[in-house]
Amino acid sequence: MTRYLPEELQQVLGAGLLSFPVTHFTAELEFDEAAYRANLGWLSSYRAAGLFAAGGTGEFFSLTPDEVARVVRAAVQASAGATPIIAPAGYGTAQAVEMARDAERAGADGILLFPPYLTETSQDGLAAHVQAVCAATSLGVIVYHRANGRFTVPTVERLTAACPNLIGFKDGVGDIELMTRLYATVGDRLLYIGGLPTAETFALPYLELGVTTYSSAIFNFAPEFALSFYDAVRAKDRAGVYRRLNDFVLPYLQVRNRKEGYSVSIVKAGMRAIGRPAARSGRR
């Protein structure tokens, strides 16, 4: 049974920094559960408001459905209640519904609903997809706005009325006008999460749009830096934010941008640098 009602989870996640832990693989690219559990235990010792198991940085796209289930269970058990665990659901509607149900059985605290795979969809179809997943679980659901899952403001407004357990909107597009219109329309009915790559880059301006938190990949290997950055953002310490951007985040982006696919690889390189290797990125 989940520890949080959806509205409680919304408040908890919105009050602190979020992160996507990497998924550990062996040299043969099999899920390394023991290493993953040990790392989740370490990350849970820091004050993150929530961890997304098998998320984007966790290479959801590289995992089989069975592995997703194993990763979620390992995260729930390794965190030992110290940090809320948000499980993924995605691909087609039937698969996403089953993933959401399985995550609830596993003891996860919420669901991050990834965009439908491959097929473009109308707003009506996208709304039906979200409604089916929300109806399949009592957990709080966060939609991930990106790729084939781009929502219009009227669609989100309709979903907030139809789905009481829809608690969040994670933005991976960066459309400032849409985010402004969305907050003006829906207000605090939803939690708004920054989900653009290396979200620290956008965190300060997004705060003015009602985006109170974001998912930090840097937290994987520099949790104290990531938390201090988040604190500077929430304090609206412009000088402190830009000092940290210049000292670390912008040089980090220069490396990340050298090649497509480095957004995960650079995180795992950072983990090797601090003596917590997670093997190379997965099977894509």
Image: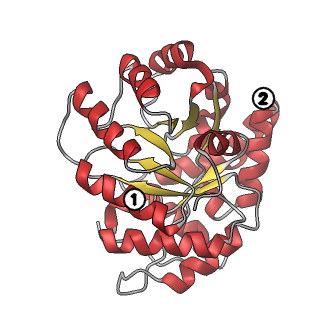
Residue 208 lies in what quarter of the image? Answer: top right
Q: Disc 2 on helix, strand or loop? A: helix
226 on left or right of 107:
right
Residue 66 placed where, x, y %? 33, 74
Q: Which labelled disc corresponds to residue 101?
A: 1
> How many neighbours does mark 2 have within 10 angstroms: few (below 14), some (14-19), or many (20 or more)?
few
How are the colours assigned in the image?
A: secondary structure
Residue 124 placed where, x, y %? 24, 26
Q: Is residue 257 visible?
A: no
Choose between 252 and 276: the one closer to the eye: 276
Residue 269 placed where, x, y %? 54, 69
Query: Measured along the vertical axis of the image, is residue 75 above or below residue 165?
Result: below
Q: Quadrant of the C terminus?
A: bottom left
Q: Amino acid at mark 1?
A: Arg
Query: Measured along the vertical axis of the image, is residue 33 above or below residue 166?
Result: below
Q: Amino acid at mark 2?
A: Arg
> How many neighbours does mark 1 have within 10 angstroms: few (below 14), some (14-19), or many (20 or more)?
some
Q: Is residue 17 visible?
A: yes
For disc 2, the marked residue is 238
Residue placed at 46% from the left, 27% from the top?
A: 160
Residue 3 lies in what quarter of the image? Answer: bottom right
Residue placed at 47% from the left, 15% from the top?
A: 177
Find the distance from the CA under tag 2 to the CA under tag 1. 42 Å
Q: Which labelled disc corresponds to residue 50?
A: none
Residue 18 placed where, x, y %? 63, 50
Q: Disc 1 on helix, strand or loop? A: helix
Query: Closer to the observer: label 2 or label 1?
Result: 1
Q: Quadrant of the N terminus?
A: bottom right
